[in-house]
Image (cartoon, helix red, strand yellow):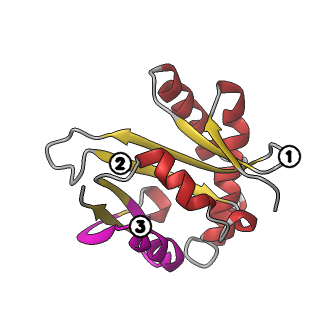
Amino acid sequence: MGHHTIRRAEPDDLETAARVRALSWQQTFRGLLPDATLDGFVDSVWTTRLVEEWGTLIRSGGTVWLALDGDGTIIGVAQSQADDAPDAPAPVRLSKLYLLDGAKGTGLAARLLRRAVGAGAAYLWVLDGNERAQAFYRKHGFEFDGASMPLEDDLAHVREVRMVRAG
């Protein structure tokens, strides 16, 4: 397995990190999202958009966390941000946490989660039907609060469900 490390992303990392996110989607959501969406995802507008979004986030003082394998290759990514909206169920939102299949079951996801949101109150949206992720978050104190929303555009038939951890 080698030694895994977690560090902040730099602007030069973002293209690779976005591709890792796309590959993770392909590995994780096969059968949950349409094949056509997943097949083109790595080189799609979604990846380009994410690089721009993360660049803006980093320039404004936000953080994207990277998980690296022993060779320094990016194998996971996490992102969180403060949420002070009146209807937010917790002050911090975990907006992304993705690992490639080979890194799952290593304890790395738990380390990324802790680095991104700490141990306090937080919330996230997870794909309805992604039972592995839901079980992982439950293990770390998150519970469904009953909120759900459809994904955008051509994925509107798929729902995300919200999970919240009290402080």
Residue beneath the point at 47% across and 52% down: 114
Q: Amino acid at mark 2?
A: Arg
> Contact (CB < 8 A) between labels 3 and 1?
no
- Disc 3 and disc 1: Cα gap in Å? 28 Å
**Number of residues whose C-alpha sits closer than 10 Å to that of mark 2, classed few (under 14), some (14–19) or many (20 or more):** many
Q: Which mark is residue 87?
A: none
Residue beneath the point at 29% across and 61% down: 165
As displayed, is residue 1 above or below residue 46? Answer: below
Name the residue tied to disc 2: 93
Magenta region includes residue 144:
yes
**Number of residues whose C-alpha sits closer than 10 Å to that of mark 1, classed few (under 14), some (14–19) or many (20 or more):** few
Q: Nearer the viewer, residue 91 or 120?
A: 120
Task: Read off the magenta span.
Answer: 125-149
- Disc 2 and disc 3: Cα gap in Å? 15 Å
Q: Amino acid at mark 3?
A: His
Q: Which mark is residue 140?
A: 3
Q: Nearer the viewer, residue 35 or 103?
A: 103
As displayed, is residue 3 above or below residue 33? Answer: above
